[in-house]
Amino acid sequence: MTDQAYNFAYLDEQTKRMIRRAILKGIAVPGYQVPFASREMPMPYGWGTGGVQVTAACLVPEDWLKVIDQGADDTTNAVSIRRFFQRTAGVAVTEATAEATIIQTRHRIPETPLTEGQILVYQVPIPEPLRFLEPRETETRKMHELEEYGLMHVKLYEDIARHGQIATSYAYPVKVEGRYVMDPSPIPKFDNPKLSDNPAIQLFGAGREQRIYALPPWTEAVSLDFDDHPFETSKAPHNCDLCGAKDSYLDEVITDDQGGRMFVCSDTDFCGGRRAAGHAGRLGGDQKSSKTFANSFEGIWPGAEVAR
Amino acid sequence: MITAPADALEGGFSEAPLQSARAFREILEAMARPGTIRRVQGARPPEPLSVAAGVALLVLTDPTTRLHLAGAADCPAVRDWVAFHIGAPLTAAEDADFAVGTWDALQPVTRFRIGQPDYPDRSATLIVEVDRLVNHGPALTGPGIETATWLILPETAAFRANRALFPLGFDTIFTAGDRIAGLPRSTRVEAI
Amino acid sequence: MYVAVKGGERAIDNAHQWLAEERRGDPTVPELTIPQIREQMALAVNRVMAEGSLYDPDLAALAIKQARGDLIEAVFLIRAYRTTLPRLAGSRPVDTGAMAVDRRISATFKDLPGGQVLGPTFDYTHRLLDFTLMAEGEAPQQRNLPDATPADRIPHVTSFLNRDGLIEPVDPSDIAPPDLTREPMELPANRPLRLQALARGDEGFVLSMAYSTQRGYGRTHAFVGELRIGTVAVEVDIPELGFAVEIGEIELTECETVNQFKGSRTEPPQFTRGYGLVMGQSERKAIAMSLVDRALRWQELGEDFTGAPAQDEEFVLMHCDNIQATGFLEHIKLPHYVDFQAELELVRKLRAEAMALQEAAE
């Protein structure tokens, strides 16, 4: 049920119009960061206020909403944001990637390929890919204007000189349609290939930094690299210990204080779906036991469970 | 005391939050997938505006956006309707954030804002009223389009010239009856 | 055996319940009321109103209570509330010359029209804990001076200097100032936007920036020309009536500093100005704001940029908002294990390669 004390999807209509206009300009200039008058939301900056505002501006009552953080539907902040929209928009929620019409995400792109008709909304902390090379907005804006991306290539090249390879493992920058260099939000570079030519609409919201940007469907997003050091994805060299997947991004879970560890899919829906279909990994038998380790926030933070 | 002609009071959204949400999704899909034709509903603007143009105005414009009414759209009935339901300040073409009218009435389209090199988003969105929208005409390629699509267009030269300005340029929403299609500046239009 | 836990919702509910208990504290101690906070914690209420950009003492008091006295959290509650409020009207500029002052002091003239009014200040109190308050002592004695009949208008000190051309003139402007709560911050900013950002900026941040200018990082040689605290009327134009009506009064603190002069052999030197205006009684903030305002005006006044943080508009404006700052700071406690895993794999790989090279060399 929608909480009647709030407008549909929380934001007032004028705010939604302002955000919607910014989204359309973002769609028209893929990869360009459109300034928008981000509002204070009832959750803190850094918790996904940009993503929440974009989602709120896009939601319709018929939507099926999925919210993930670190690939998982049951991480505490994903639960909190999902609840927020259940309460303020009354939308149906789902954990199944294939069933969702809008997916709000922090730090991952789902393993299950997205389709036309879906919108993926990213929560973005620092939208400016050049920010850590040049802290001034007035300067980075000029660099985008002039397509002056030499600084970024110098940084990547210094990596190669020092480490023999590009030492950026997440938030790996991409060039969109040969024009704007864009920060894909802190997704692992494992996910970068999914950014390009994706059938879904990808929207990026940075609340504190007041920016919205977009990748329309079927838009080219090329991870920056060099001819002699081509872009490579990376993941832990293991299979999922639960579902046996060879090709999904893995979380490493420390299981004891003797160096024991296991690797599990970060995408909980993907992993659950595979297990339901009968796939099993090293530790993925169907035997039940009380919980020991959690593929969720509580698992690494016992304090939440201790809360009475 | 607000005084407006009785007609001007009609034809807005009856349930603005939900109707504008649904309509925006159609507009978003239209702009994100240039050439696809979507349907919208909920507005009954005065003549000569189409339902779709009325919906686009209700969804996207408000007192913070400058609106240019072009040609026949610049009539008392439309002005009153805009004043009552939207409150957008009316302005000359050169200053407009949004403009609405037929393709002929909007000429020359080079008048409209194309954004600044450092802020390409500060550009106009043209709501172009057309007689019909069908997927037949010049080929469109670019972001949002998997291989190619086709859309009837009033002309191609102006859109090709606009594309050549990228990342600057205006963005276009075509409206016909309750149908809507998008042509952002990023779309490449086949020369015909 | 491993079973994924789905305890997020329950954990959140439990945490919220626990938080509510902690907020209340020992139930045998009487609960604080909103009027108690509003009346007895007035300076905290003022700070929450100023940084929350919403003048409502009752709501600010409620926010302080709900936030367990964490003022930044209270500011956040107020900001999140105000952002959803409809804009019904814009007020006329308030006239601080017509302020009903509780306090008005000048550090630049010993006496002046309107007089020095000390008002309710900590300035000359001895900072000794007053144990009678702990014993829930009696109400303070009545002031033994009758309230002076307030003057209609108390002229600003800077207007005396202005008359003689001794201070840079500021022409009143009817241009609507930008609204950073409705438009994205655009840099470079103009002075109204800077003042707006500083007025709702974190008191501690603005204080430290101002202090740094006093210690030589962007020195501006400030004198407090005038500091005044009091209430002013807020008026709104009603187009249907054709005149403005007073919708209420708010308390403000205003500080104008008189700063180092500019000029040359040919151009007569003049003092320059710094300005601070804060909702409520917040004089530390108002003084600090006027110093930072002055330091940020280096370009307009033809001064050198010395690299001082307080001169750096982008640095100051992008970092003075404590709600943005605290959110981004605290968000690093949210899970980041996807990114950490990516870094872990990278470091393992780089180490393996480096060690292989080392072995090969040996």
Image (cartoon, coloured by chain):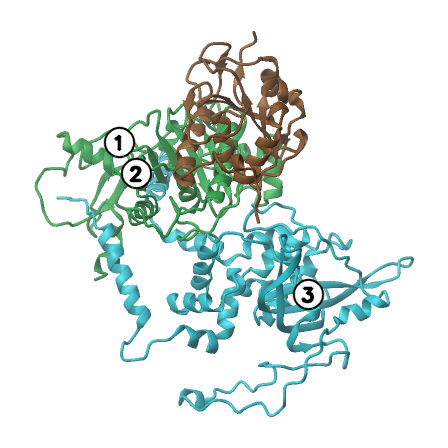
Q: Colour of chain A?
A: green
Q: Which mark is nearer the camera, 1 or 3? A: 3
Q: Are marks 2 and 1 in contact (CB under 8 Å)?
A: yes
Q: Nearer the viewer, residue B55 or A279?
A: B55
Depicted B69 relative to depicted A307: above or below: above
Secondary-structure class at tag 2: strand
Q: Position of residue A91 (x, y in %)?
A: 30, 40
Question: From this viewpoint, is residue C312 visible?
Answer: no
Could you classify mark 1 by the number of other residues whose Cα lies within 10 Å: few (under 14), some (14-19), or many (20 or more)? some
Depicted C212 relative to depicted A289: above or below: below
Q: Are marks 3 and 2 in contact (CB under 8 Å)?
A: no
Secondary-structure class at tag 3: loop
Q: Look at mark 3 in the image and give the residue it sits on.
A: C95
Secondary-structure class at tag 1: helix
Q: Colour of chain B?
A: brown
Q: Amino acid at mark 1?
A: Glu
Q: Nearer the viewer, residue A289 or B102?
A: B102
Which of the two labelled residues, at mark 2 and mark 1, occupies the earlier sequence position? 2
Q: Nearer the viewer, residue B27 or B104?
A: B104
Q: Look at mark 2 in the image and give the residue it sits on.
A: A66
- The number of numbered badges drawn on the structure is 3
Q: Which mark is nearer the camera, 3 or 2? A: 3
